[in-house]
Image (cartoon, helix red, strand yellow):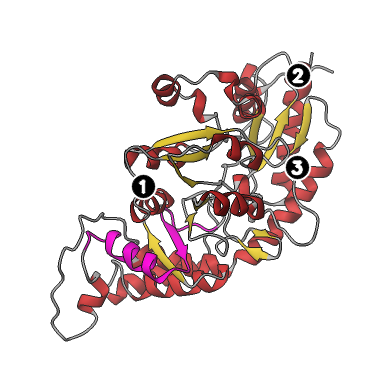
């Protein structure tokens, strides 16, 4: 029996759009925001400090600095490390643009390397090949919530005297060999964007164990002032702030932290639910025509993928259309499919600026052409998950060779 796809005028798999990455805010978050508004202190204040303290404890870091984005944290990481013109920073090609953009922002050069075909994270073997006398840092990206091979990356960094700045935008709660991401490197950066596992609508956090780095981050993240707003105004004693460096406006507000406090306390519950949903997906997609596989996840009991993304790899040789058409068809079925990501070495700015060719990083190129992400959030009902599976099967069946 032939079924007409919604993109071709047929009936969609579901009536209402299943939004990709919808945040899961409940009454706790709402009440906390209302309390903050009534308090009269909505900027950076006591709730931001509380959120920082609780987040640091959750990931096992000594210090956490709340920011307005993960991008801000990555940029500040470059600044406090003194990375600038003439320097190089190693970055995986398969990542969001911000990972490399912040390197450009400080006048340094992002040097792309390929990814591991199983984990889709940076390939340590490729890191070593890319190191030059100008290399100053490595930015491993925990793609989708999958931990990078931090033991090997740290070995390489130590041997070559390089800094490690982790892009943990997807990795709140991720565990590698028994330790949470946030415990491995001098600087680790987390995202709390609207679709992240922990959301403050917009926001981020940078963690460190180094008190000197923490002090620099505190100064740089709020205009370069020697004392931040909460320290100035929570006491009746008058104090003068001085501009000691030309800093930035990167602070988080108490309104955002109000959401973060309760989102953080629910993380283990959220992750457990994501694992349940992913297990259902795994079984449903295990033998579906048109797929190569889903992303690898560790099963050693020592590491944990927090499933910020649930990705499928399409077998394009068995399909009459490309990945973009498949995503378009799923969206027409009211399934909020998405793309994470097109490789940066194939993006116009980096391609044209540095002369990269598509096959310079063949794994990233292949993944970038065939990968797509499916909705996976804790509040999804069983029918939502079944609708996703049915829609994927419907689309792939119609487009099979």
The residue lying at 66 percent from left, 28 percent from top is 363
Left or right of 216? Residue 302 is right
Viewer-nearest residue: 151 or 357: 151
User: Marks 2 and 3: CB-CB under 8 Å?
Assistant: no
Which element is circle 2 on?
A: helix
Circle 3 or circle 1, nearest the eye: 1
Tag 1 residue: 83
Q: Residues within 10 Å of mark 3 (few under 14, many from 20)?
A: some
Q: Is residue 38 visible?
A: yes
Q: How many marks?
A: 3
On whether residue 221 falls in the magenta region, the answer is yes
Q: Residue 172: horizontal and vertical position, in percent?
A: 57, 58
Identify the disc placed on residue 398.
2
Q: Residues within 10 Å of mark 2 (few under 14, many from 20)?
A: some
Q: Residue 189: horizontal and vertical position, in percent?
A: 47, 55
Tag 3 residue: 386
The residue lying at 80 percent from left, 17 percent from top is 2
Does label 1 or label 2 sit earlier along the sequence? 1
The residue lying at 38 percent from left, 64 percent from top is 213
On whether residue 59 falls in the magenta region, the answer is no
Viewer-nearest residue: 198 or 77: 77
What span is colored magenta in the figure? 198-224
């Amino acid at each position: 029996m032939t079924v007409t796809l919604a993109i071709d005028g047929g009936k969609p798999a579901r009536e209402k759009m299943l939004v990709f990455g919808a945040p899961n805010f409940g009454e706790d978050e709402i009440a906390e925001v209302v309390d903050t508004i009534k308090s009269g202190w909505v900027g950076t204040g006591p709730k931001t400090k509380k959120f920082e303290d609780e987040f640091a404890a959750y990931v096992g870091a000594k210090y956490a600095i709340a920011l307005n984005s993960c991008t801000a944290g990555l940029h500040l990481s470059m600044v406090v490390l003194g990375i600038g013109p003439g320097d190089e920073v190693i970055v995986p090609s398969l990542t969001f643009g911000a990972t490399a953009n912040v390197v450009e922002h400080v006048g340094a050069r992002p040097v792309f390397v390929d990814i591991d075909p199983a984990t889709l994270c940076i390939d340590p073997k490729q890191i070593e090949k890319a190191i030059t006398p100008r290399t100053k840092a490595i930015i491993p990206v925990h793609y989708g919530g999958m931990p990078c091979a931090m033991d090997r990356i740290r070995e390489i960094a130590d041997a070559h005297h390089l800094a490690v700045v982790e892009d943990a935008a997807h990795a709140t709660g991720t565990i590698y060999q028994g330790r949470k991401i946030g415990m491995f490197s001098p600087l680790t950066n987390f995202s709390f964007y609207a679709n992240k596992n922990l959301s403050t609508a917009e926001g981020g956090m940078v963690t460190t164990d180094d008190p000197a780095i923490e002090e620099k981050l505190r100064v740089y993240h709020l205009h370069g002032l020697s004392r931040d707003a909460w320290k100035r105004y929570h006491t009746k004693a008058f104090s003068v702030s001085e501009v000691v460096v030309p800093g930035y406006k990167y602070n988080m507000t108490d309104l955002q932290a109000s959401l973060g406090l309760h989102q953080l306390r629910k993380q283990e519950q959220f992750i457990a639910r994501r694992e349940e949903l992913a297990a259902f997906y795994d079984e449903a997609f295990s033998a579906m025509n048109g797929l190569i596989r889903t992303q690898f996840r560790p099963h050693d009991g020592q590491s944990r993928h927090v499933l910020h993304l649930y990705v499928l790899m399409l077998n394009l040789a068995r399909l009459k259309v490309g990945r973009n058409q498949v995503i378009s068809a799923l969206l027409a079925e009211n399934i909020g499919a998405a793309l994470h990501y097109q490789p940066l070495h194939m993006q116009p700015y980096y391609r044209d600026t540095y002369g990269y060719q598509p096959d310079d990083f063949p794994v990233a190129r292949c993944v970038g052409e065939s990968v797509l992400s499916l909705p996976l959030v804790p509040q999804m009902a069983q029918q939502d998950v079944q609708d996703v599976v049915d829609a994927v099967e419907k689309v792939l069946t119609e487009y099979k060779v």
